[in-house]
Structure formats: structure tokens, C-alpha cells
């Protein structure tokens, strides 16, 4: 998948993850994109360990979304003291 497509899909995944985790108001679009891209790497590393593999851009979106949610859970633990 091309780098530009990965950035766009990662940004969408970060935005969706911030809405799911109710952190949309506290972070801007740039941080959403960064969380989505890093979440894509986290999801790409984490999901094959549990036996899940997705392909295509929808698969990358699902992987990045799951990774971004895991990343935001970790951030919430350090900043708020609780996962949600």
C-alpha cells in the first residue's frame, strides 16, 4: 500500500479511535493522525500474535483502528489513571 494511502487510512483510524475512546475533544487532528499511524504499527505487530490477519485497505483500517485503541488505552492509563 502506498505511503500516502497509509497516512490517510491511519489518520481516519486515529480519528475513529479518539471518538471511540472519547478523547476527540482533547486532541487535535495532527495527534489523531499520529495516533492512527502508530496504531497501525502496533496493530500490525499485535494482531498476528493472536492469529488475526487482514488484507487490503479495509484490513489496514481495522488493524490501525485496533492498534490506535490499544495505544489510547495505554495513554489513558498514564494520564487519567484509568483505561476509559
Image: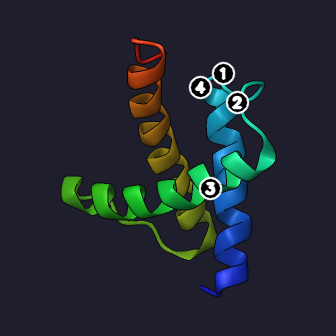
Mark 4 crowd level (few <14, some 14–19, many ≥20, 10 Å Cα): some
On the question of residue 29 being in view, the answer is: yes
Q: CA distance from mark 4 to mark 3?
A: 16 Å
Cβ atoms at labels 1 and 4 below 8 Å apart: yes
Q: Which residue is mark 2?
A: 19
Sequence-earlier tag: 1 or 3: 1
Tell me if 80 is positioned left or right of 77 in this view.
Answer: right
Q: CA distance from mark 1 to mark 2?
A: 5 Å
Sequence-earlier tag: 4 or 3: 4
Select label 4 or label 3 by which is in front.
3
Q: CA distance from mark 1 to mark 4?
A: 4 Å
- Image quadrant for the N terminus? bottom right
Label 4: which secondary element: loop
- Residue 50 horizontal/vertical position (percent): 21, 52
Cβ atoms at labels 1 and 2 below 8 Å apart: yes
Mark 1 crowd level (few <14, some 14–19, many ≥20, 10 Å Cα): few
On the question of residue 63 being in view, the answer is: no
Select label 3 or label 2 by which is in front.
3
Sequence-earlier tag: 3 or 2: 2
Q: Which residue is mark 1?
A: 22
Tell me if 78 is positioned left or right of 23 in this view.
Answer: left
- Residue 29 horizontal/vertical position (percent): 79, 47
- Residue 74 horizontal/vertical position (percent): 39, 32
**Marker disc for residue 21:** 4
**Marker disc for residue 34:** 3
Q: How many marks?
A: 4
Label 1: which secondary element: loop
Cβ atoms at labels 2 and 4 below 8 Å apart: yes
Select label 1 or label 3 by which is in front.
3
Please tell me which residue lies in front, 1 or 24. Answer: 24
Amino acid at each position: 500500500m502506498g505511503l500516502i494511502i497509509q497516512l490517510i487510512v491511519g489518520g481516519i483510524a486515529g480519528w475513529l479511535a479518539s471518538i471511540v475512546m472519547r478523547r476527540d475533544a482533547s486532541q487535535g487532528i495532527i495527534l489523531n493522525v499520529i495516533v492512527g499511524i502508530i496504531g497501525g504499527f502496533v496493530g500490525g505487530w499485535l494482531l498476528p500474535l493472536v492469529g488475526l490477519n487482514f488484507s487490503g485497505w479495509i484490513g489496514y483500517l481495522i488493524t490501525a483502528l485496533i492498534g490506535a485503541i490499544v495505544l489510547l488505552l495505554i495513554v489513558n492509563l498514564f494520564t487519567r489513571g484509568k483505561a476509559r
